[in-house]
């Protein structure tokens, strides 16, 4: 479903602040793979997601989604293949529009737009059905402005919107990092239920080792713009944080220090 081949990216080349962020990164995701992506700050995690999303074009390498070469496709044209949830809960929704209007924008993504703004009863029923799976009562608040929702409610709504059209690939970029400790696990569980229900191919960036181990069927760790660990199957199911720290140190000849302690 997703193939990344020898991806390289350098920001500000030829300047004193040149930064080679991705080094020949290659990765293949089969349909239904749920990959958690972990690493210290500056490891290249979010940059890799940005490369898949088309936020920037790679210097070299190739990206295909569902067999379609999207390497040089503009971000807005690539969006038809992708669902995406950002770190900031305010980013994925329009605060001054109500819930059903936000969902209608997501539902009609990639379709031709007319001058009319009309939500049919069948559409509204679909929105209620999808929202009811969140168990947050949002299905009964379709006319409420999204700006009235909490951060956790907005992020849960964004997850539903991002998966409404069952994208080829779902990208979750530290989507619970800005939520409080009680809300973040709930949003993670909601996401996992949606991913499992629709067998979505997913990449989730996280700073939390326990979340990376608990969710998904595959764990990838990056360091210095390279993939240093790729763990799946029974090995991942039995993995502990301590074992993962040891594996990282062995694979990268580094230890977790400073802000990398966030991984613990």
Image: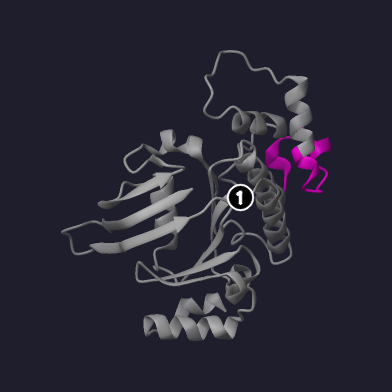
Residue identified by numbered label 1: 89
Range of the magenta residues?
130-150
Quarter occupied by the C terminus = bottom right
Q: Residue at x 76, y 41 (%)?
A: 131
Query: Left or right: 65 with respect to 166?
Result: left
Q: Residue at x 72, y 53 (%)?
A: 193
Residue 165 image position (x, y, % from top left): 61, 36
Q: Residue at x 60, y 42 (%)?
A: 162
Residue 248, above or below 13: below
Q: Is residue 133 magenta?
A: yes
Mark count: 1
Color style of the picture: one colour
Among all residues in the image, which is located at the extreme top?
115
Q: Is residue 143 visible?
A: no
Crowd around label 1: few <14 · some 14–19 · many ≥20 (10 Å): many
Residue 28 image position (x, y, % from top left): 44, 57
Residue 216 image position (x, y, % from top left): 61, 62
Query: Left or right: 256 with respect to 134?
Result: left
Residue 127, above or below 220: above
Q: Is residue 108 magenta?
A: no
Instruction: In this rendered view, identify the residue nearer to me: 49 or 228.
Output: 228
């Amino acid at each position: 479903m997703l193939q990344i081949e020898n991806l390289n990216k350098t920001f500000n080349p030829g300047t004193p602040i040149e930064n080679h962020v991705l080094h020949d990164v290659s990765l293949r995701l089969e349909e239904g793979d749920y990959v958690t992506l972990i690493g210290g700050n500056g490891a290249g995690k979010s940059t890799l997601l940005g490369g898949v999303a088309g936020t920037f074009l790679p210097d070299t390498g190739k990206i295909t989604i569902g067999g379609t070469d999207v390497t040089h496709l503009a971000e807005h044209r690539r969006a038809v293949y992708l669902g995406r949830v950002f770190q900031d809960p305010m980013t994925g929704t329009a605060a001054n529009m109500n819930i059903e209007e936000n969902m209608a924008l997501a539902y009609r993504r990639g379709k031709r737009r007319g001058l009319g703004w009309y939500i049919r009863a069948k559409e509204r029923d679909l929105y209620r059905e999808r929202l009811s799976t969140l168990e947050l009562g949002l299905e009964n608040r379709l006319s409420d402005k999204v700006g009235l929702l909490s951060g956790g409610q907005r992020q849960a709504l964004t997850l539903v919107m991002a998966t409404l059209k069952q994208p080829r690939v779902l990208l979750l970029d530290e989507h619970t990092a800005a939520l409080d400790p009680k809300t973040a696990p709930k949003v993670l569980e909601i996401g996992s239920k949606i991913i499992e229900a629709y067998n979505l191919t997913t990449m989730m960036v996280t700073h939390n080792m326990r979340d990376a181990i608990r969710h998904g069927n595959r764990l990838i760790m990056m360091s210095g713009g390279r993939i240093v660990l790729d763990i799946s199957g029974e090995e991942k199911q039995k993995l502990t944080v301590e074992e993962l720290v040891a594996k990282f140190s062995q694979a990268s000849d580094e230890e977790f220090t400073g802000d990398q302690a966030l991984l613990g």
